[in-house]
Amino acid sequence: MSKEVKPESVSLCPLGMTAAPEQELLCIFGTGDFGRSLGQRLLQTGYRVVYGSRRPHSCGPLPQGAQVMSHEAAAQSAGVIFLCVHRENYDFLETLVTQLKGKVLVDVSNNLKKNVYPEANAEYLQRLIPGAHVVKAFNTLSAWSLQNGPSDASRQLYRGTKYKRFPDWLDRWMLCRKQLGLLALGFASLHVLYTLIIPIRYYVRFRIAESTISKIKENQTSVFDTTMAWRVDSYYAMGILGFGLYLLLGISSLPSVSNALSWREFSFIQSKLGYLTLFFCTFHTYLYGWDKFLRPSYYKWYTPPGYMLCLVVPSVVMALKLVILLPCVDRSLTRIRRGWERTDPEGDSKKSLLT
């Protein structure tokens, strides 16, 4: 291979410690979920990271070891700039045409829907900043896959921003959701295994034989209960569907599988199918209980049966999810997660100057 480097190419620092005598400074525009996660990964691989923010002094928690400054100062300090903002917020780049000239601009954005714009984000970005070298990268990764912190919709709606840090206990609990999910999958597998061996248990076979013999001696026949047949078939069907989707969630969480999925595929499996799995498993338990909550004999020592206690948390979760799916709530939450804040200090100051 030739030892000469073409002027158009960009030299990349290898990950080896001996081959990287000097740490390269990389710039990230955007201090949201993806920007913080990407910065944390870059710091772990030995790079120096500087963030460009519209509010350097109040941009929320950032990875330890990273610097933060204005967009103009950050663009001047680095040769490679990661653009971690949404397309509708590209307006500030028009004032940085001089600073971005000759720089490598990495576009990591994805649109929420297809065919929203007549051209791709990278093409629009190249037209907006003709002097920069625009490349597309990291758009198939999610902030979650980059080991990002939690994304609690209720707290974001309450605070009106996504840039405030969550309490430590909530941060630690939400970061261990994957482990809790795998633990629940293990218990679900044991539940399925136990259900399969119920017919071969001695106690069950004895009770069935005893009931059959007693009816023969008394010359009685059992009336076919259509409601019971429908309920039992639905109970097993919901359980099979829920367990099948649960297995899919567990398989997709494996690093070897999740790394092969795109951002949209991983988000669909872990979010949309996750709630669908919760619905099937919860409905499975509701069919098991049926009308038992109306019978006083099931309340031993005046305490509710175990299946009712198991339904409290998933029922509350699904109820809150329905509230978040309301158009008025979903619209506000989407704006917050795309960078909007209820109280914008800069916007307030501009309004006060105008008035």
Image (cartoon, helix red, strand yellow):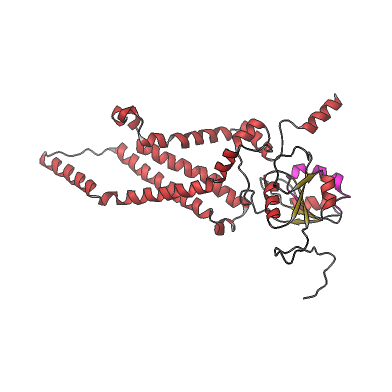
Q: Nearest the camera: 143 or 272?
A: 143
The residue positioned farthest toward the right in the image shown: 98
For the residue pair 335 and 123, the one nearer the viewer reads as: 335
The location of residue 1, given as percent across then percent down, is 77, 76
Q: Measuring 51% from the left and 49% from the top, which residue is drawn there?
A: 179
Q: How many marks?
A: 0
Q: Is residue 89 magenta?
A: yes
Q: Is residue 295 visible?
A: no
Q: Is residue 104 magenta?
A: no
Residues 27 and 266: in front is 27
Please state the extent of the stretch shown in magenta in the rendering.
82-100
The image shows residue 46, relative to residue 355, as above or below, that is: below
Q: Residue furthest top?
A: 355
Q: Position of residue 23 (x, y in %)?
A: 77, 58
110 with respect to 177 (left or right): right
- Image: 251 above or below 341: below
Q: Is residue 49 left or right of residue 268?
A: right
Q: Is residue 347 left or right of residue 143?
A: right
Quarter occupied by residue 161 = top right
